[in-house]
Amino acid sequence: MSVEPLPSVEAFMRPSPPPSLFSTSPTIRTLRAQIEAATDSRFAHPFASGAVAVVWDGHGGAGAPRRLGRRVLRVSPGPLLSPYDTPATGLACLRLTLEGSPHGGVPADAALASRLRTLRLHGRNRFPGGLDGDAMPAGANLILLDGAATPTRNRAFVADVLARNPRTDFVAAGPEGGMGVAPTGRLRVLPGPIDPWAACAAAARVFVADAQSACTARLSGAEVVESGSLTGIEDAYGAGLHWFDPWTRAPIGRDDCLDRIAWLRARFRDNDRPTVLVGISRWKRPGLDAFTTGPYGPPVHAMGAEEAIRLAPPGARVLAWATRMPEHLEALCAEAGLPLSRVEDGFLRSVGLGASLRPGASIVVDDCGIYYDPRRDSRLARILKTAEFPPDLVARANALRRLVIARRLTKYNVGLSDEAGAWPTDRRIVLVPGQVEDDASVRHGSPVVRSNRALLAAARARNPDAFLLYKPHPDVEAGFRPGKIPEAEALTLADRIVGGLSIVDLLDRAHHVETMTSLAGFEALIRGLTVAVHGRPFYSGWGLTEDLAPNADRGRRLALDEIVAGTLLLYPLYLDPVAMKPCTAEQLLDRLAQERDAAAPSALALSRRTLLAMRARYAVLNPIVRALRARRGIARPPKGDVPE
């Protein structure tokens, strides 16, 4: 989804920009960058000479600028948006009208009609695909409601259609649901959102009041009865429309924008049933809500197993945060016939630690197990065991891996550089990444070496002449989680403790990594280092690592980029943390690199004041939180988890 330049025809349609603009509402201020890009003008003081008042359509406020003798630029949402678009997160399309005339934009054409028919886009695109035959009978007279109109306007339109057709039965439906329209003897109302393309194709006649509905109905092949003067594709999609990247808000070409809207709609439709989220801390909820909202609305949150079952509507699924899943939730879901999946952070997460309340920008949703617990196959393990990896997917994985290396990105993207440090040139450098010792990956996935002290000892025994670097886990280093080795004791085995340094800087210098199950082993593999694993992490057993744990072999050999494809492309979901919309792995790399580069380098992406506050919070509140979780049936919660 590369950004393309604006079509050249727009340059000919772009009118002279207003001298300057001034905002009349908070919504306009939120959309300021998009409006400036669309108008080639800039916002200034309201009293600047010739400044044009910019008004959000539908929110009033046009009268005052007119009384001041100012011209008015009205801004409204365009006819096509992604399901995640809001003024706060960016709108993929804006309609601009200056003094009643369309301002800029490109003309509609036959190519646009073909694209709309192919992509089946309409309005905010928050409706499910297809049509339930029981809901919409074939051959019905359909009143297609305007999803952008107010309930009052839609009710007036329905009343007008019924009055003009006193002997006809109708079905009223819309992409945003019934819009407050009440059924009568001759009117059946479908309360939920419907696919307008499928509904129009099934109807005998379609009654419409707006240009977009008329366009959709006509392109779907329906007989259209209009109740208004705006009926053509030019009226719905022509002059005055400006198209933007839904994530960055940068102006882009119309066709490119339509592709991006369709991609986001597909992610929205992936959430094809109601969702109950279990065990999600409040600070994580905005991101998880964005990941799981779909045509059936936002997720419902529960903290206990019985509450989750009680709140689940028919046809729902249950997603539980893996380390906070009540012990008996799986049995209750099976009894109730509810699909259950575990949720955990992905492998490209954030700039900063989860333990310091930095929300993650990637998750995995696993309906089999979870990737760090080898006691049962996870969805990732099944992908790596059985998936075909076609050449185009492997090529994308190769490009992504190279981009991760070039951008110097990891899971948390914290740590300082030590470019001036003295590093030996005549000894093999071995990195030993410490872990949180009560993590499930260590408890269940490393049967012989199960502590940081034992890992250091094993690494020294296997590499007696190497220059051994020990890097404490960031959460342990911050004092949030267990696994600390006293410095004097660690230095009896390691040549240097490199706490606080960036894992990327260390991997640049190391030749080899020794780990139990740490993700640092995977990050070393993608950078071409040799890796020995004393446990059974997801990346071991495929022929790329030295596997020291018993029963580590997976029975299949994979190339590095095939493992990357499964781990970073097929398994996780990604979220743009700025736009709060689903995105690709490549887009997230852009955001993480921007955020990391804008922040001052630090060991943990925490100020000293924040670090002390977090330590106090963990020390005081965690015992209370553990007791509450135990009452909810969550067995052995990690001691360092974040308070509710």
Image (tube, rainbow, N blue to C red):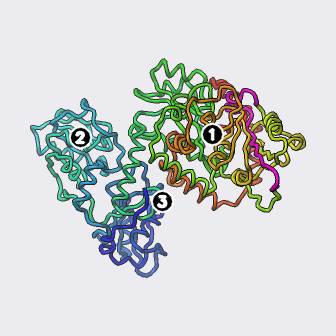
Instruction: Verify CB contact (< 8 Å) between mark 1 and mark 2.
Output: no
**Residue under the point 20% across and 52% down:** 214
User: Which is more foreground, mark 1 or mark 3?
Assistant: 1
**Residue under the point 64% across and 26% down:** 634
Q: Pinpoint residue 574: horizontal percent, then vertical percent.
A: 52, 46
**SS type, badge 3:** loop
| Circle number at residue 379 | none
The residue labelled by disc 3 is 248
Judging depth in this view, the residue of 291 and 389 nearest the camera is 389
Query: The disc labelled 1 sits on which kind of residue?
Result: Leu
Q: Pinpoint residue 57: horizontal percent, then vertical percent.
A: 35, 61
Magenta range is 425-449
| Circle number at residue 544 | 1
Disc 2 crowd rating (10 Å Cα; few below 14, some 14-19, many 20+) is many
Disc 1 crowd rating (10 Å Cα; few below 14, some 14-19, many 20+) is some
Q: Pinpoint residue 606: horizontal percent, then vertical percent.
A: 72, 52
Judging depth in this view, the residue of 200 and 162 nearest the camera is 200
Residue 438 in magenta? Answer: yes
385 sits left or right of 139 in the view: right
402 sits left or right of 550 in the view: left
User: In the displayed structure, would residue 44 be above or below residue 119?
Assistant: below
Disc 3 crowd rating (10 Å Cα; few below 14, some 14-19, many 20+) is some
Q: Pinpoint residue 631: horizontal percent, then vertical percent.
A: 65, 24
630 sits left or right of 339 in the view: right
Q: Quadrant of residue 257?
A: bottom left
Question: Mark 3 and mark 2: span between their CA atoms?
Answer: 33 Å
Instruction: Verify CB contact (< 8 Å) between mark 1 and mark 3.
Output: no
Query: The disc labelled 2 sits on which kind of residue?
Result: Ala
The residue labelled by disc 2 is 199
Query: The disc labelled 3 sits on which kind of residue?
Result: Thr
